Image: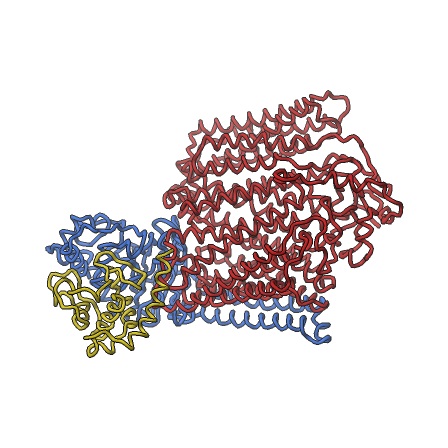
Amino acid sequence: MKSETGFDPALFDRFPTKEERPPGEIEELERVWRAPRGWGLLTAVNNNYIGTFYVGAAFMFFVLAGFLALVMRVQLALPLQGVLPQETYNQFFTMHGTLMMFLFAVPMMEALGVLLLPQMLAARDLPFPRLSAYAFWAYFIGGTCFFMSLFFGLAPDGGWFMYPPLTSTTYSPGINADFWLLGIGFIEISAIAGAIEILVGVLKTRAPGMTLARMPIFAWAMLVFAAMILIAFPAVILATLLLELERALNWPFFDATRGGDPMLWQHLFWFFGHPEVYIIFLPAAGLVSMMVSALSRVTLVGYQLVVLALLATGFISFGVWAHHMFTTGMPTLSISFFSAASMAVSVPAGIQVFSWIATLAAGKPRHNTPTLFLVGGIVTFVIGGLTGVMVAMVPFDWQVHDTHFIVAHLHYVLIGGSVFPVFAGLYYWTPMMSRRPLSERLGKWVFWLMFAGMQITFLPMHLTGFMGMPRRVYTYLPGMGLEPTNMISTVGALTFGVGVALFIYDLARNFRFAVEGTAGNVYGGGTLEWLPNGLYAARSIPVVRSREPLWDDPNLGDDVEQGRYFLPGTPTGQRETIITSPIRAEPQYLQIMPGPSVWPLLGALFTAGFFLLLTIQAYTPAVISGILAIPSIMRWLWETDRPVAKQEVDVGGGIRLKTYATGPSTHGWWAMIMLLIVAFMVFLMLVFGFLFVFGVHPEYWIDFNASGPALPIAAVYTAGGALVLLGRHLLQREGSTLWSPTTQVLLGCLALAGAWILDFALWQDAGIDPEASAQGALIMAFLSLEGFLVGVAVLMGAYLALRTSRNMIERPRSVTFDVTMLFLVYTAAQGAASTLLTRLFPGGL
Amino acid sequence: MLEAWPPPIFDPAGPYAWPITTLSWVLLAMAAAVLVLVVVALWLALFGSQRAQAKVGGTKIIWMAGIALPVVVLTALLLYGLWLTSSLSDEIEGDEMRVRVTGEMWWWRVAYLDDEGQPVSHDANELHIPVGQPVVLELESGDVIHSFWVPRLSGKLDMIPGRRNLMRIQADEPGVYGGQCAEYCGGPHALMGFVVVAHEPPAFARLMIERTAREQAPAPGAASQGAELFQTTGCAACHRIAGTDANGLAGPDLTFMGARRTVGAGILPNNTGTLMGWIGNSQAIKPNNRMPPYPVLSREELQAITAYLEMQR
Amino acid sequence: MGDGLQPALCILLLAVVTLTSACAPPPEAVTETALASAERGKAAIERVGCASCHTITGISWPQGKTGPALDGLERRGLIAGELPNRPEVLAAFVQDAPALVPDTAMPAMPLTDREALDVAAYLYEIGR
């Protein structure tokens, strides 16, 4: 057998081990992983808790957003009703879309990832439990406050894609739009934190032997999902930042009268917005693949094809964004490309649908609630997919675009492709988290009410669209013939609502949170989440030899529980998990994990406070809150990356692993690289915006004669980066004094800050005015973005210096040093690139 | 506004709409066929005989129905769609009649252009076209993004600030065709309709000659009390009537108000009662539109202004 | 939301009223308006836009404020302050008010005789 890391796979044959485990080992494990009690539960970071909170919060937003939809349907039941005044209706549909997309769909998928992935991969926890906690709290606090804006009439009313100039200060003078921009921008940050967590978790914490080819489909789906978030979300973060800057500081990025372009928003938004649909669909498709296989008691037919389909969807989905813009008058050539890509993306969906059908045929699916939801979901999703192919045809889209046909289409896709699978999943996985499973009898009622409600609501709505009713209308005129289908849709929506209400009743009656003594594997799944579990996940981490280990090795559960596999206890006396290699999952080292802490919660609270107070224009409290967030986050980090007494420990079967690792194989390094991908995508999107706006309105651009200092400034940036690299080099060498590597980093920080100040000052000299034209605004945006990175770099340098002064950077334990270095080098590179671009283009070339 | 039945998309009235109707039927048929295929496969998978289940339960069906079939169907559709896209948007030759339509919150500014592109006649919320000839529309926006849509004549095209989009419409029969703003533009977006009126070419030519002449001539009823009130009560600040001092550009041009078919941008029939109600308190009819209510007008004043506007034909 | 339920309730009420009114037509109105239909009247009101000036029960949009609200018509002594309150007079008034009351603000409306009677029937329905 080949090896990826030098680990001998033959060692896996030592498991399950035969010898007795020492007494007290399991008690020690329980002690280390014990959850805080009472109010202390708020400081919990373990994925069982955070995952459950997360799923619960996402479900809460689903119910709230659904309630808004019901009120809207009542308003539209008859023409010209006054259930909701125009202003409130416009806020309702904006909030419905926004909540469903940003506060339900994506977080629900991340929540399921946090909850299920560690168990499926047989890791003790995700690699950054405190980051999960931070992501959850930020999302929960931010989302709740965002929702509350509805009660004060301050909710945004520009539609969930917030097209400027409708959302500019001229046409939306209130703070409603700011709630959206700051609230959603902030929640996206939490989504990215979750995505990094999931990516590193899937790639680095799988059970030994779980090669990529043996990975559960859900893990594949989450891998693609998280990677897509890293690529797609920066676009919307940048877009919201730019629009907020336009609103707050009058920088005209989207204002056509000053050389900006409203289409820039649409490109940025949909570059995120379309992948977003697949971001929501792929994890759900992963759940479906898991469940059809488990419920049919047969392995998934066409596993490789499905994996390929997931990857293909991820790639193609970045080439389809402009199909939301077929009616904006784009050139025929470009719309043809996007039309073709939009059709191509349906092929991977077809692969998955037929794989599920084949799996159902190959096995013996039983008539139970999850299966009903799966089959209902497949049918519904296929209808949505077919109408999707229809609207990918450009001339057809010219007619139905922005009508109720689209409303019907997107609800078929999202409910069939995502909501029904999630409900199937809630029924299927609840026994893992609860003492009692959910009721099968009620469940069937829930399904039929929801399924019938769905079809009754949205099938006639296609016709409503054909009849010419645009979307986002608070009313329609009588006597045009729109009454019957609208009334039917409202009846259907209420039916759907009754189904969801019944589900909540079922939850209240039967869901009793538990980690031990759960109802267990009632549906007979074959993957690792059904191993006997505690807060520490499985007692010992099994060697994985197939895709459904529980089916293939009936003794596995028992062996795992008796500690006959990896890590049966806690050799270092702390929380820990095994880091494995990304492809073949060979054990690399033992990761020490942080435990409960109040700091992620406080960090989230203050970060949320910063954004929300900013929204309501309470600037001083906002700044105070923002400043408080920084020490909170640093304090949480302070406890990580600590020296461990034992350098190497026995992780079972006589296999010894290091308790610390350095360099590119570490989970910290991987996470930082992913963060830098996000930063790079933000930068790339800004470069796109710069070139795009120039392409549209070159007549507004003037030559600032600013190219002279371009090279010197870039040189100073480069020097900063070089100093940091020198520091890293010194750290590896014996003999240099302890302070010297950190000194290099601090000098590097100084160079970066100097270069930035020079850049900024010289632009001021050149007479740049960000309010005068989009050119000035964009250049200032580059400077601001770089300034933000430099600020963070300086903070990181200070943190590193502080730790160095406390003797916490000890050679060769360099993780803190490494991540600082990576960030600083990136900052230097981006600084050099942006100064060259803004100063040389277009005048200096 | 749009008549919903028969569905306008399936009731095309011009050469830029009917090919899309054909396409729509083809697509619906395709979707129905594929849906039946999937449901049958699913049915066999769940309830079929063992033989049927064995047939469905393998990777072969993924290759056949999940890959090969979509590739073939989609390629065919794509070629059809691309051909149709380019044939519907072929070069605009430049000798067609041109009208500039500007989307405003929440009404439509209309200007008929001469060969040099100069406006010769102004109107609002109503577009007159000759039957049987393509008319090129220059679509612009005065504020936010709107979308111009007359489903029986063509697909929709957005009106974007800072840009000018060109589209063609053509009606084959005389008649009135409903239109509607299709891009959410805030507030009363739901109540932003308009009508396109198609005339036989001779009648259309007469109409244009009359209107072009009217733009240069004094307005009717100049001596009436309504004309005076139109100036003194503030109407003229936002509305223009050609041949008078009323030159406001913020609101719809009222030079031909009396001839218009609708009041309030396609939402009410134009008669003395509705016009009077609109002038008196348009906020009660179209909440949040830009025109303030005029409770200060006395009964006689209201009647006089209404009568004056009805003279503007 | 109280307002919001009103239309739905009203429609329900209207249906009930329409049914019962067939059994018990208002006195005096038997001969002239026996064939008038409140339902058709409502459609005519919506078509010509009476509600542009008048708030009319059962018509949720528009709710014009330029003219008086049209409720309690049954109990009023006179129409427009000077005409006898009888269906055929009301019908004539909604069709061509200035002909009956020269100094009224109400303009003539494009209604047929038939529709005018229907409109009057509707106004009495809601005016009880």
Residue sitting at 30 percent across and 72 percent down?
C39
Chain depicted in yellow:
C
The shade of chain B is blue
* Residue A381 shows up from this direction: no
Q: Indicate the position of residue A788 as horizontal and vertical percent values.
A: 54, 33
Of residues A15 and A149, the one nearer the viewer is A149
On the rendered structure, is A421 left or right of A335?
A: right
* Residue A364 shows up from this direction: yes
Q: Indicate the position of residue C30 as horizontal and vertical percent values.
A: 21, 77
- Residue furthest to the right in view is A19
- Up the image or down, A540 lies above or below A606; here it is below
Of residues A279 and B215, the one nearer the viewer is A279
- Up the image or down, B221 lies above or below A267; here it is below
- Up the image or down, A489 lies above or below B49; here it is above
Chain depicted in red:
A
Of residues A277 and A156, the one nearer the viewer is A156
- Up the image or down, A48 lies above or below C86; here it is above
Q: Quadrant of residue A637?
A: top right
Q: Quadrant of residue A681?
A: top right
Q: Indicate the position of residue A414 as horizontal and vertical percent values.
A: 55, 58
On the rendered structure, is A171 left or right of A708?
A: left
Q: Indicate the position of residue A342 as horizontal and vertical percent values.
A: 55, 59
Number of residue marks: 0
On the rendered structure, is C101 left or right of A350?
A: left
On the rendered structure, is B218 left or right of A744?
A: left
Q: State the colouring used for the structure image.
A: by chain
